[in-house]
């Protein structure tokens, strides 16, 4: 959808920047980089996780993810990200996410570590804002939709 004040190239660049934030957020969670994850959010950004109170601000996001157990391995497969520009400096997106997890203490086989039996399918509803430092997540709501296993 083209906004009245943006040309096609500007719109594509903005959409790509927002899509990249979605992918980097998953990467930084999976690789235990809470500082880099928090930096993807606006200063007053909000992260609403499925089973918790909202995390408001970069410090709250950083602190929550810094407390993740170091032996927890996760991998998020992100797909179907659709970004919509509302204004030249505001956008929103929805993405699907499939989450696998395992324990680092588990002995790896030639195929890697055995994943936990529960696989979770969820989605992210993201709102983005263009700041002086570039596009940032303003609000993220993560929701679980279904799961397999125990």
Image (cartoon, grey):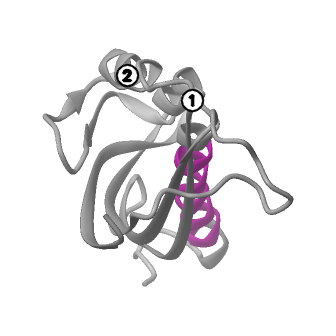
Between tags 2 and 1, which lies in front? 1
Residue 28 higher or lower than 90, as above or below: above
Asked if residue 130 lies left or right of residue 112, the reply is left
Image quarter (top left, top right, bottom left or bottom right) of the N terminus: bottom left
Q: Please tell me the numbered disc located at residue 58.
A: 2
Of all residues, the one furthest to the left in this rendering is: 53
Circle nearer the N terminus (2, 1): 2
Would you say residue 29 sits in the magenta stretch?
A: no
Measure the alpha-carbon separation of dots 2 and 1.
Answer: 24 Å
Q: Which residues are magenta?
A: 11-27
The residue lying at 23 percent from left, 30 percent from top is 55
In the image, residue 44 lies at what x, y percent? 28, 26
In the image, residue 108 lies at what x, y percent? 76, 47
Query: Pointer 2: residues within 10 angstroms few (<14), some, or many (20+)?
Result: many
Of all residues, the one furthest to the right in this rendering is: 110
Residue 114 higher or lower than 44, as above or below: below
User: Under tag 2, what secondary structure?
Assistant: helix
Q: Which residue is mark 1?
A: 71
Asked if residue 53 lies left or right of residue 149, the reply is left
Seen from the viewer's position, the closer of residues 83 and 89 is: 83
């Amino acid at each position: 959808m083209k906004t009245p004040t943006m040309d096609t190239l500007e719109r594509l660049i903005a959409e790509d920047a927002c899509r990249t934030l979605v992918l980097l957020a998953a990467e930084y969670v999976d690789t235990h980089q809470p500082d880099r994850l928090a930096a993807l959010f606006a200063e007053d950004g909000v992260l609403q996780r499925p089973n918790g109170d909202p995390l408001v601000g970069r410090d709250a996001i950083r602190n929550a993810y810094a407390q993740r157990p170091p032996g927890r391995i996760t991998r998020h497969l992100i797909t179907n990200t659709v970004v919509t520009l509302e204004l030249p400096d505001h956008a929103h997106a929805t993405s699907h996410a499939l989450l696998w997890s395992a324990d680092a203490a588990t002995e790896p086989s030639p195929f890697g570590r055995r994943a936990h039996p529960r696989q979770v399918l969820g989605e992210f509803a993201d709102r983005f804002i263009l700041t002086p430092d570039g596009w940032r997540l303003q609000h993220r709501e993560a929701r679980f939709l279904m799961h397999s296993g125990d």
